[in-house]
Structures are given as C-alpha cells and as structure tokens.
Amino acid sequence: MILLNKLFSAERSVKGRVDYPLLLLGAVIYGVSVGLVLSPNEIAPGGASGLAVMLSRFLPLGVGSLTMAINLPLLAVSLYVFGWRFLVGTVVAIAVSGLTADMCTLFTPLTNDIFLSAIAGGILLGAGCGIVFRSGGTTGGTDIAAKLIKRKKPYMAAGQIFMLADGVICVLSGFVFGSIDNALYSFFTLWVFSKTLDMMLYGGDRGSLR
C-alpha cells in the first residue's frame, strides 16, 4: 500500500507534470485490455475504444488504429482546455495504447469466455486508465470529457462520469453485434472498469481527484 501511495502521488497531476514511465505502463495495460481481451470478444464498454471495437467489424483497420483516428478531433480540445503538457501526455498515451492494441492481434486472445473477458477486461482497462490519469495524461475519448466534468463538478467520482458518458455506446453495441448479450456484457465491463478506476484514483476517498 505504501508503494502504491508513492507510485500514484497526486503532486504530479496537480503541478502539470507528466510521469512518462508511468504513462507508458498505463497505456500498455490499456492497449492489452482492448486488443487482447475486449475486441476479440466483441465487448465495447464505451469510449473511443468501444466505438473502435464496433467500427472494426465493418472497416479493414485494427481497433488500435481506429481508436487513434477517433481521438484526433479531441486532441484539439485537449490542447485548448488543458495545455500542451496535457496534450503531449495524451498523444503519447493514445499512440502507445493504440499500437499495443493492434500488436495484440498477433497473439491468441487471453480468453474466449465472454464473462471472464468482461471481468479481466474491465480490471485491466480501469487499472491502465487510472495509471495514465495519475501520470498526468489521459487515454483520450471520454477521458477528456471526464476531466472536463470533474473540473466543474469536483464532487463527482470519475467512474460515475464514465458510466454516464459511455452507457449509450454499450447500448449501441447490442445493435451492432446483433445480440443483447454483447450490450449487457459491455455494461458489466464498464461497471468493473468504473470501480477499478475509482479505486486507483481515490482509494477510500471517492469524491476528490487529487
């Protein structure tokens, strides 16, 4: 626990510094979750990566490449609102997680059991995203929206914001993949993700993003 407290010291994000070793670690974990667990099982738990999982069914591009393409317009908003330090960290996180997700297609999926995939994918997604957040960047997509809302409503937990923003993508996945099971498992993954993210960011204190 002491190691984790040091690892995720809040002073990094408060002073605008980006901890690149941590950011790279979080981005790789995030990319593994998308490319090796969620995408092979057609689970789309919101965000740019969720949209990419759905689009990859129709387009001849990897889910990582699609995620990077979806995030391009959001980078302009990131630069305007949070500044170039935040933008650099976000670009690195998006690129590394996207490339990692595409590279994962070279390997056998972690599991073909959709229930286990929902659990493992949600945990890895939340852990990776939490590490990236704590390092001073984001993985793009609704991460940026969550930081914007968090700035205006500091009492809201980040996981709750993600649940609200990403729910519609989970519903849409049921139509895209032609099964309500996909939508339900996407919601379940999103719930696991949100709980993991809140634990990574706040521990026992859910209401303050330090």
Image (tube, grey):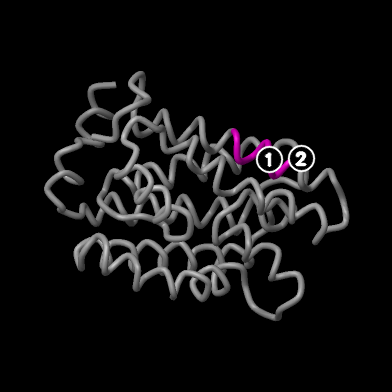
Residue 134 occupies quadrant: top left
Residue in view at x 49 percent, y 72 percent: 68
> Residue 108 versus residue 41: which sits nearer the camera?
41
Question: Which image quadrant: the N terminus?
Answer: top left
Specify the amino acid type for callout 1: Phe
Instruction: Determine whether the residue tagged by mark 2 lies in a helix, strand or loop.
Output: helix
Question: Which image quadrant: the C terminus?
Answer: top left
Which residue is identified by label 1? 187
* Image height of 129 relative to 59, above or below: above
Outermost residue, left side: 15
Which residue is identified by label 2? 184
Task: State yes or no: discs 1 and 2 in contact (Cβ < 8 Å).
Answer: yes
Count residues near mark 1 (Cα–Cα under 10 Å), then give few for <14, some for 14-19, many for 20+. Answer: many
Q: CA distance from mark 1 to mark 2?
A: 5 Å
Residue in view at x 71 percent, y 57 percent: 40
Q: Which residues are magenta?
A: 185-191
Specify the amino acid type for callout 2: Leu
Looking at the magenta stretch, what is its main secondary structure? helix
Residue 70 left/right relative to 179: left
